[in-house]
Image (cartoon, helix red, strand yellow):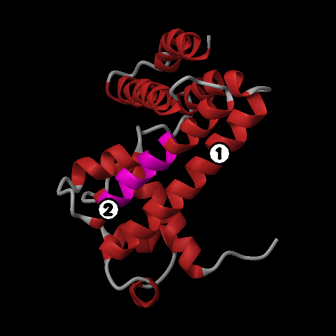
Amino acid sequence: MPAISKREQIVSEALKLFYQFGFTATGVDKIITEAKVSKKTLYNHFKSKDELVLATLRKRDELFRNNLMRETERLGDSPRAQLLALFDVVGDWFNEKTFSGCMFINAAAEFSDADNPSHIISAEHKRLVCEYIRGIASEAGASNPDELAKQINLLIEGAIVDAHVCGNKSAAERAKRMAKVFIDLALD
């Protein structure tokens, strides 16, 4: 297995730290220490902390969506089953030891200006997840795939917040039961 590049090493450690502690609260010195690189090395790869934040958000998007798609397709043997499997995948995530909510919700809150690049990447992540759900809804034969995708996505987003803010690790199960009603209406 090839060694990861210094850039990837920095992004990987920064992602963990930003996810656990937040973007503003995590200083460059902490990232340098955890990544075991010099300040010069960090700034050779990233012009600023803001640039590093954007790189970590892009990496998190890639990792999260790839996992969501892979696990949803593994757990659901049909498009209809995959629409419900989405909730099993996020439910597993809620129960991970390192669960600290959604990095994109957190980023959008910290970088609340809609024109901020971190906010823009966060909104794009949410759009891409909804687009993936829309594709499954379309394959399942939903009468209105856009509406069903928005309903399911809203239930997922609400479950994320409930799991993180209220500590409700079973939020995905409740959201899944609610989603089944929407799915049954849209597919029958």
The picture places residue 162, in percent across and down from the top left corner, at: 36, 23
- Asked whether residue 80 is in view, the answer is yes
Q: Are marks 2 and 1 in contact (CB under 8 Å)?
A: no
162 left or right, relative to 58: left
Q: Secondary structure at mark 1?
A: helix
The percent position of residue 127, horizontal first and vertical second, equals: 43, 47
Image location of residue 11, percent across then percent down: 50, 69
- Mark 1 neighbour density, 10 Å: few (under 14) some (14–19) many (20 or more): few
- Answer above or below: position of 87 versus 66: above
Q: Which mark is residue 67?
A: 1
Residue at x 54% of width, y 64% of height:
12
Pick the quarter of the image with the C terminus.
Answer: top right
Residue at image coords 42%, 74% = 32
Q: Position of residue 108 (x, y in %)?
A: 28, 50
User: For numbered disc 2, what is the local secondary structure?
Assistant: helix
Asked whether the viewer can see residue 26, the reply is no
Up/down of 48 relative to 12, above or below = below
Residue sticking out furthest to the left: 113
